[in-house]
Amino acid sequence: MNGSVKLFVASLIVFAASVGFFAGSFCNRPCPKGPMAVEGANPPPPKFDGKGPHEFGKGPRGDFKGPSPEVIDSLLQVTPEQKAALEKNRAETDSAFKELRRNKFEAEKALGEALESEDSAAIETAKAKVLEADKALLDHRVNSVAALGKILNKEQREKFRAFHKENMKKFKHHKGPKGFKGPKSEGQEQ
């Protein structure tokens, strides 16, 4: 075979691969669920629900929320009394945080509208509401950590802090939906 025939055969192979790739990307049939759904693959283990071992949740906008309460409870080896107290604490703090975040969102929305109107009195009022909402969120966070400290014993608090610190290290290097890695700290490359 001379060089032009080899080039022609190679270009046919590349063309066929390209056509196959594009035809496959326009396929309308539903994709299999999960990595083990391919025919002939080993079936998933019993009681497998498709979630990973840590069962990470999602926030309202798809944000990282953290491990499920069940994972934390098993890690800390809480007693049934502690578990009941933690469940009550979670329910109260989650609903309060949701309301406080909603208030902050509304305050920031009002600030945006005031900035567009260029009314200095409205801007100052809206700014005060945003600061008040931030203060309420911070106060609630401090109070919820203090309440958690009253439920857990010293050893459990230390385990929780170590677990939280490790998760924050992992999350620090997580790229968000638009590639934002968070603010730089001294000596840190982004």
Image: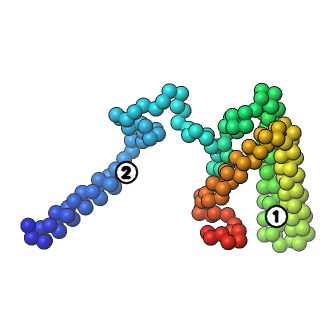
Which badge, 1 or 2, is on the more N-terminal residue? 2
**Can residue 150 be spotted in the picture?**
yes
Task: Answer with the quarter of the image where residue 187 lies.
Answer: bottom right
The dot on residue 168 is none
162, 46: nearer the viewer: 162
Question: In x, y percent, where is residue 5?
Answer: 12, 67
126 lies above or below 45: below
- Check disc 2 and give the amino acid type: Phe
In the rendered image, the quadrant that contains the C terminus is: bottom right
| Residue ID for mark 2 | 26
Question: In x, y percent, where is residue 106?
Answer: 80, 55
- Check disc 1 and give the amino acid type: Leu
At a point 80% along the width and 46% down the height, the residue shown is 97
Question: In x, y percent, where is residue 172?
Answer: 65, 58
At a point 53% along the width and 27% down the height, the residue shown is 47
At a point 61% along the width and 41% down the height, the residue shown is 54
At a point 67% along the width and 46% down the height, the residue shown is 66
